């Protein structure tokens, strides 16, 4: 190597090293939680995982879901921009980390309510099917049990009364085996969690009790809850309606029927991935990701005799 080439190489290496150091020293991106008003006493807090509902009651603030690890304090900070009332209760729609892990940063006095299966999945820390692999660290155990569900139910549970009333429903397996539908009757609003995350194929998490075959029936029951006019989704940017839930149930039912027909015809999961497209009837739905189509088809194949 000539002296000139060696010098240029050294300068380039030094430049790359400087950039690496600068990148390592760059501040982390701020954790921003945005707040949208749904009703006078109900808000949706977005960013950092699943959509969080904030419900203001006479006794304090109730949160539905608490986002990713490390987002607990930013979430609490966002709550403070809306109310001075303390957070007294958290309700989890299901066990996944992007809906539960923020609550380990909450005061130990906060009551955590979830379906009995959700509590079990939180204790087991099972990987999300086709999204995570291998044993997962248990953030609740690592934090001395803080954030773990302390109150559970099986089918239904009513919390508070009058304008502060909250109804919890479990209609069966779907996204997980512990999905909870959170209804605010006085406001006509229901949080459906990731049983309807957005207009796309959902995760059918068999590692945590989920089902493809039962999914649409569960959604259909949720869509029939009386008095509901507005739906808070797991991840969608705007609210929807019970009619949207019914359409989503039909979308999933059609996908399941197509996958089952493929299996019975002797075709493979890969055949489904290669041929399935979002039907034209579902305008505005996202184009399918091959990995999601494959994972969901695998679940349905396994459930179909």
Image: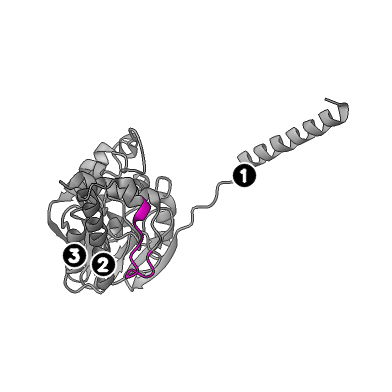
Contact flag, marks 3 and 1 (Cβ < 8 Å):
no
Identify the magenta region: 274-285
Q: Secondary structure at mark 2?
A: helix
Instruction: Give the number of the mark in front: 1 or 2.
Output: 2
- In the displayed image of the protein, which residue is found farthest to the right? 3
Q: Is residue 236 left or right of residue 109?
A: right
**Among numbered discs 2 and 3, the one appearing first in the sequence:** 3
The residue positioned 17% from the left and 69% from the top of the image is 224
Picture coordinates of residue 238, whole percent (x, y): 38, 68
Residues at marks 2 and 3, CA–CA distance in whole angstroms: 8 Å
- Disc number placed over residue 26 in the picture, else none: 1
Any part of residue 205 in sight: no
Image coords of residue 186 (percent x, y): 22, 73
Spatial separation of the CA atoms under disc 3 and disc 1 = 48 Å
**Residue 120 placement, left or right of 66:** left
* Mark 3: few/some/many CA within 10 Å (<14, 14-19, 20+): some
Residue 87 in picture, x, y percent from top left? 32, 56
In-front residue for pair 83/102? 102
Q: Is residue 37 above or below residue 146?
A: below
Alpha carbons under labels 1 and 2: distance apart: 43 Å
Quadrant of the frame with the N terminus:
top right
Q: Which mark is residue 220?
A: 3
Which one is earlier in the sequence, the residue at label 3 or at label 1?
A: 1
Residue at numbered disc 2 = 245
């Amino acid at each position: 190597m000539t002296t000139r080439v060696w010098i240029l190489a050294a300068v380039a290496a030094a430049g790359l090293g400087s950039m690496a150091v600068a990148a390592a020293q760059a501040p982390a991106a701020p954790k921003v939680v945005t707040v949208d008003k749904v009703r006078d006493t109900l808000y949706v807090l977005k960013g950092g995982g699943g959509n969080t509902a904030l419900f203001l009651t006479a006794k304090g603030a109730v949160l539905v879901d608490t986002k990713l690890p490390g987002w607990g304090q930013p979430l609490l900070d966002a709550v403070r921009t809306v109310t001075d009332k303390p957070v007294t209760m958290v309700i989890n729609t299901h066990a996944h980390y992007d809906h539960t892990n923020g609550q380990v940063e909450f005061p130990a006095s906060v009551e955590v309510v979830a379906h009995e299966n959700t509590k079990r999945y939180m204790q087991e820390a099972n990987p999300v099917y086709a999204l995570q692999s291998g044993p997962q660290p248990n953030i609740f155990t690592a934090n001395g049990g803080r954030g773990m569900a302390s109150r559970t139910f099986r089918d239904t549970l009513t919390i508070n009364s009058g304008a502060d009333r909250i109804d919890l429903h479990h209609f069966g397996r779907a996204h997980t085996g512990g999905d909870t539908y959170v209804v605010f009757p006085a406001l006509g609003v229901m949080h459906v969690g990731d049983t309807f995350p957005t207009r796309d194929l959902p995760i059918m998490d068999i590692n945590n009790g989920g089902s493809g075959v039962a999914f649409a029936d569960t959604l259909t029951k949720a869509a029939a809850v009386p008095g509901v006019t507005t739906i808070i989704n797991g991840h969608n940017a705007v609210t929807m309606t019970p009619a949207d839930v019914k359409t989503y149930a039909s979308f999933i039912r059609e996908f399941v029927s197509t996958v089952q027909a493929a299996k019975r015809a002797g075709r493979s999961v890969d055949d489904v991935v290669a041929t399935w497209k979002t039907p034209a009837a579902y305008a505005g739905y996202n184009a399918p990701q091959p990995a999601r189509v494959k994972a969901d088809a695998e679940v349905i194949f396994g459930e179909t005799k």
